[in-house]
Image (tube, rainbow, N blue to C red):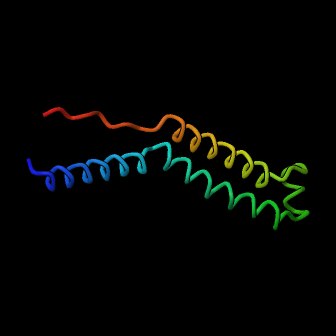
Amino acid sequence: MSDIQQGASDQSEKRERRLAELFDIRTVIGALFAIYGIVCLITGIADFSTADQAKSGGININLWAGIGMVIVAALFIVWSVLKPFRPPETHD
């Protein structure tokens, strides 16, 4: 195999590995938790009325749920960074 073909093959393998890491289920779940957590945080901070307070027993549920979701998102992202997904090697 020529050097050019070998270089293209290496580039293709690196790209496939990067895509596998990017679309790892931990990364996707972490991103979704982060998005929903931030939305809940903003809602909890900006819109907590006395009617909401009466319904929830004085607890700002959106705020606490948002904090929890952001923490879970951080755990998923840290987990995927510390122990990245490595696709199995193919031997020809």
Position of residue 80 relative to residue 35, above or below, is: above
Left or right of residue 38, residue 12 in this image: left
Task: Choose between 36 and 79: the one closer to the eye.
Answer: 79
Which residue shows up at 62% across the image and 40% down it? 75
What x and y, as percent, mark residue 14?
A: 31, 49
> In this image, 1 relative to 12: left or right?
left
| Residue 46 position (above or below residue 9) | below
Q: Describe residue 70's horizontal placement relative to residue 64 as left or right.
A: left
Q: Residue at x 14, y 53 (%)?
A: 5
Where residue 3 appears, x then y in whole percent? 15, 51
Which image quadrant for residue 37?
bottom right
- The single residue placed furthest to the front in the displayed view is 3
Task: Provide residue 42's location: percent of width, then percent of height.
Answer: 75, 63
Q: Quadrant of the C terminus?
A: top left
Q: Is residue 40 left or right of residue 91?
A: right
Q: Residue furthest bottom?
A: 46
Residue drawn where x is 68% and y is 61% of the image: 39
Please state which of residues 90 and 3 is positioned toward the viewer in this rendering: 3
